[in-house]
Image (tube, coloured by chain):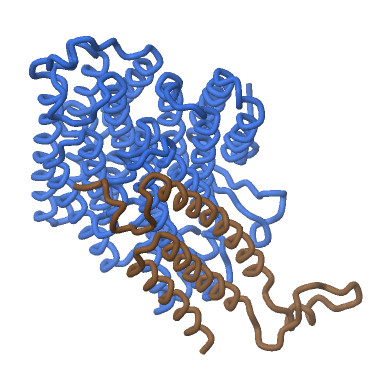
Amino acid sequence: MNIDVQTLIPMFVALPLGMSLLIQLVARRRHVLGELLAIIAMLLLTLMSCYAIGHKGIYHLGGWPTPIGIDMRLDDLAILLLLVINVVGLAVTLYSVDYMRRFTASSHFYGLFLLMVTGMNGVVLAGDLFNLYVFLEVAAIASYSLVAFGCAHEELEASFKYIVLGSLSSALILTGVALVYGITGTLNLAHIASRIAQTGMDAPLLLAFGLFICGFSFKSALVPFHAWLPDAHPSAPAPVSAMLSGVLIKAIGIYVLARLAFNVFGVTDSELSLLRWLGLLSMVVGGFLAAGQKDIKRLFAYSSISQVGFMVLGLGLGSPLGIVGALYHLVNHSMFKSLLFLNAGAVEYATGTRDLNKLGGLNQKLPITGATSLIGSMSIAGVPPFSGFWSKLIIVLACIEGGFYGFGVAAVLVSIVTLAYQLKVQRMAFFASLPEALKGLRREPPMMALAMILLAVGCIALSFAVITGLRDPWLIGAAQQVLTMGVFK
Amino acid sequence: MIYSLCLLLILVGLYGVVVSRHTLKIVVSLLIMNHGVHLLLLLVGYRQGGSPPIVDPGSVISEFASGAVDPLPQAMVLTAIVIGLGVLALMVALCVRLYERYGTFDVTEIRRLRG
């Protein structure tokens, strides 16, 4: 079967959007139908992303040519992100089948979930700045309501915090869009890039770029802007936490930051050093705050801040090796962090608590959760030969290659802190002795187990990506070239 | 001159978000800030004494283009306002639910999440 990739590009947005509306129409009373439709949609999206590997293209919306119409760009970097979003999305949808039975309105959940996927796919494919903003808001609004999905005290509070800070950052981004349009007279990313390449960066453009950095640092929760994440991610239902921490902060945060910095504005040394310091700060602060947590999901949320720091540090090095490390870590992190959040969800589902002090010995009762979480923990802690080891190794090597020895040492130290708090989770929740109160636990439901196994296999499979070469892992090397090629031609 | 008005609106909104304790006041402040941004976006396409960007059947396109204001930012502002409305509705709904749970609109009393 031969499908033109050109016609496939808009389907990445249209399919989940249409399906989310369809679910609202037909599945209000029949929950099974909603689950089935959501799984079909995510399965199709995953197949489409796999099919798109190696292709590239520009789709003109409505057939209008570039300066007038809206473009959607598909390149290697976009494909990498699409794969991440849709594969993790598929696993999370499978997991939700059992998990969301506890909630009354599961059709709303699948509708909002697919809307979030729509927004993220749209951001990744957007070829112009305003479209990017619109899809960003679609994903963000869906995620605000998903955080509040259970409507309990903590969820509402976290969602309110998230929505206030999220709207603030969106206002900053929109101001940036207005400035860029006022100065360059165009919104198309490639056209903006060529204008800036001709005229250079002047003061208003620098202001716009600064606004973008602030806005997207909020979205990706880098340290001075991280206050919402440790509340929002743990409070959400487990599948949503997995999607937010695993994918959302990267698709609408790190990805856009990298795209704008490298492909549109063109990076200078001072901007790179800003990214490096932001990365270092997130890495260290997130790591140490994670180590002190007692709530298992809150610990993982702080750990996300720390790991995002690794990615931004890698990007800030600006060298091809550093960017490979950052992108590799991005893909790895989306796998193991979603896996860990799903594990935390399974623990909460079985025991009713997330407090590490009340848990213990769960390996006896939840063998699949225990085994997969061990894989996830070892990957995130960077124990060889798991995938996290390779991406962190590449980032550290890139630090040394670029002469930033201090950053390299810090990255190694934070990895050790990561290992420490992951071992703490393993010891307190899964090993140790089983408390009396937890003797009567049942095993995890089959679909939850399936989703966790899927992601664990993904974690292990990713460690083989380096076989094709440390400097040029499969698929990630191609994505890295998109960024290092410099601004769009 | 008029650009500084936008900046003023944005800063008034920002000030409100930072110092308010009432959840609904925070929502209103965000609204003010958003409208500051919308005004900036509109001004970007504005031209002093420009004509509305609607083509008469008889007019010459090049002449028309040199006199009309830029319609694109107007379209963008419409979109941004609609998005803002969606966020606003969600925020107000959250405020109502928060009031039902906590019995207060004061953000300093809505504090269960720590660490």
Q: Which x, y percent locates residue A333?
A: 29, 36
- Residue A226 screen position, x and y as percent: 28, 54
For residue A307, what is the image quadrant?
Answer: top left
Q: Residue at x 42, y 58 (%)?
A: A260
Q: Identify the colour of chain B in the image.
A: brown
For residue B22, what is the image quadrant? bottom left
Query: Which one is nearer the viewer's eye here, A421 or A334?
Result: A421
Residue positioned 52% across, 37% down in the render: A112
Please provide percent x and percent y for residue B18: 33, 68
Q: In this image, A412 relative to A13: left or right?
A: left
- Residue most extreme to the right: B58
Q: Name above or below for residue A321 compared with residue A468.
A: below
Chain rendered blue? A
Residue at 42%, 76% (x, y): give it. Answer: B12
Q: Is residue A315 above or below residue A90?
A: below
Q: Quadrant of the N terminus of chain A?
A: top right
Q: Position of residue A315 (x, y in %)?
A: 29, 52
Q: Is residue A456 above or below residue B113?
A: above
Q: Nearer the viewer, residue A335 or A143?
A: A143
